[in-house]
Image (cartoon, helix red, strand yellow):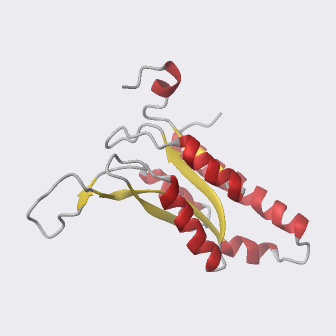
Amino acid sequence: MQGSASEATLVGLLAAKERTVRRLRASNPDWDEGAIKARLVAYTSDPQLQTNTRQECSCLLKDLVFVDQSNSSVEKAGLLGSMPMRLLTSDNKGRLRASTLEEAMKQDIEAGLIPCYVVATLGTTGTCSFDPLEELGTICNKQRVWLHVDAAYAGNTSVSGTRG
């Protein structure tokens, strides 16, 4: 049990980092631990930008709406855990989609990086959006990546069945 959602996110990142390093060293004993850690990358939905295909506006930023998706503590966990946190664009309902995550992971793997940690959200603070866990979980399982679910804001509604 953690004292806060922020603490849980950081502890999850640190556990994912350690698990990934151990897994890779077990199959590649000559790999340097520091070199592995330097290539690890994490993912979450961008807390600032969301692609908006439903709204029109006359301003210069007509395709963007500023919202909060993942909590700012997620990006801070990446900083404290020394792991880059890729902030991925949400769909027009504020959800991180598997296709977006999969494409980002593919690009990173091709660049020599190692996907390690994904933070999904059940009930974002800005829009109360729920990321599609089954979609994201399938990608994470395929890539052997730790999936952390931040459900501090509205996750209890997914358990109680009252989400509308």
Residue 142 on image: x %, y %:
70, 55
Residue 36 on image: x %, y %:
75, 73
Front residue of this view, candidates 155 and 141: 141
Front residue of this view, candidates 151 and 137: 137
Q: Quarter holding the N terminus?
A: top right
Asked if residue 62 is positioned above or below residue 38 in the image, the reply reads above
Residue 136 on image: x %, y %:
57, 49
Asked if residue 69 is positioned above or below residue 78 in the image, the reply reads above
Can residue 59 be seen in the rendering of this structure? yes
Query: Residue at 53% of width from left, 40% of height from top?
Result: 5
Figure quadrant of residue 124: top left
Count of numbered circles in the view: 0
In this rendering, position of residue 25 left or right of residue 96: right
Asked if residue 34 is positioned above or below residue 24 in the image, the reply reads below
Can residue 7 be seen in the rendering of this structure? no
Residue 67 on image: x %, y %:
29, 52
Asked if residue 142 is positioned above or below residue 83 in the image, the reply reads above
Query: Residue at 62% of width from left, 54% of height from top?
Result: 139
Query: Residue at 82% of width from left, 77% of height from top?
Result: 32
In this rendering, position of residue 107 left or right of residue 131: right
Query: Residue at 36% of width from left, 25% of height from top?
Result: 164
